[in-house]
Image: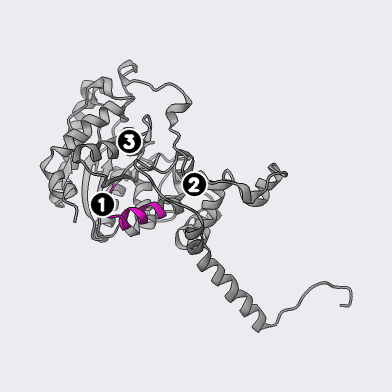
Amino acid sequence: MPNSNAVWLSGRQWFGVAVILLALMVSAPAVWRHVERFDPGPDYRIPYELSSDYWLYHRYSAWASAQEKIAVIGDSVIWGHYVPPDGTLSHYLNVETGSDRFVNLGLDGTHPAALAGLIEYYAGDLAGRTVVLQFNPLWLTSAKHDLQTTKEFHFNHAELVPQFVPKIPCYRASLSAKLWAVTERCVPFFCWTSHLKIAYFDGMDLPAWTLQHPYVNPLSRRSALGARRSPTEYGSVPRAADAKPADVAWVTLDSSLQWRFFRRAVERLRAKNCTVFVLVGPLNEHMLNEQDAAVYDQIKRGIETWLQANNVPHFVPSPLPAALYADLSHPLAEGYVQLAGQLANNPAFRSSAVTDR
């Protein structure tokens, strides 16, 4: 084939290429940790725009463990959806305890099914540490929130939920999408490349990004790791006192997928030799009618029964004043102040979290 530009490789040459590529895949994420500056300051939280950057979450949890911090993990209530970074629960726990030991490892939108995956695949470095783990009863307020509906809908952090077993009725991703989610969890190189796309290139791969920005040098891009924006900057903060009563259709604990996954999250942490303290809520019970409030009381008793039976230290706070909520589950900054005070004065919390080994 005199006119061909093809290069024919022998079996030994192909083996050499495979070894080089494998070495690059193994070493690139580790090398990048030295290239990319990551120095979380006080009250750092994963930026809202990087909520699906699990490589960054893994790096942050490793940092927290190395610094002997107490990780506060949960959904947007822990992350602080309606408050700035210095208005969150972890911030006020530090104020109450006169320390800097509590760090915000909340992630916006992590319902319990996603939280279990986040802990299993990206929080392994917290082994042996103390973790404050939040359970938000909001995820039991409807069959849709609980992922029980058979009609397909897109929910947050689908990459973190079980892709095949157990089956989630509303999750209908393609086989290729499910296989990619599993691959990304198991191969750090692919998780790292996703980090680059999310943190530097607006979620796009490099070819797609350069097509939209043909005159910008990709090497000049700065990451969004230090972004401190809060959703509150996009509009006014609501107050639950001005809202209509919530439309609640509770699912039972026995049938709840989200409660099952939360129990799995607790078990995964304890399997890592973590000391786990569970915070339930806080839910804005002022927005519940009498019937829904009675059902919620039963749910709280069921949660406490399981936690007590499994020797999990926990705290179910009394409701905050209605004016200190933004909606059914998110406190305002003043609400976090009171919640931190309730926690700091709770004997089980003081014995398990404050005296972290």
In this picture, residue 336 sits left or right of residue 218: left
| Residue where numbered disc 2 is placed | 172
- Report the magenta residues as a range: 59-71
Q: Amino acid at mark 1?
A: Val
> Residue 287: in sight, yes or no?
no
The location of residue 325, given as percent across then percent down, is 29, 25
Magenta-drawn stretch contains 47: no
Q: Of residues 350 and 157, which is closer to you in this image?
A: 350
- Camera-near label (3 vs 2) is 3
Cα–Cα gap, marks 3 and 2: 28 Å
| Residue where numbered disc 1 is placed | 266
Cα–Cα gap, marks 3 and 1: 18 Å
* 131 shown above or below 138: below
| Residue where numbered disc 3 is placed | 77
Q: Of residues 19 and 219, which is closer to you in this image?
A: 219
Quadrant assignment for the N terminus: bottom right
Asked if disc 3 and disc 1 are in contact, CB closer than 8 Å, the reply is no
- Camera-near label (2 vs 1) is 1
Q: Amino acid at mark 3?
A: Val
SS for callout 2: loop
Q: How many marks?
A: 3
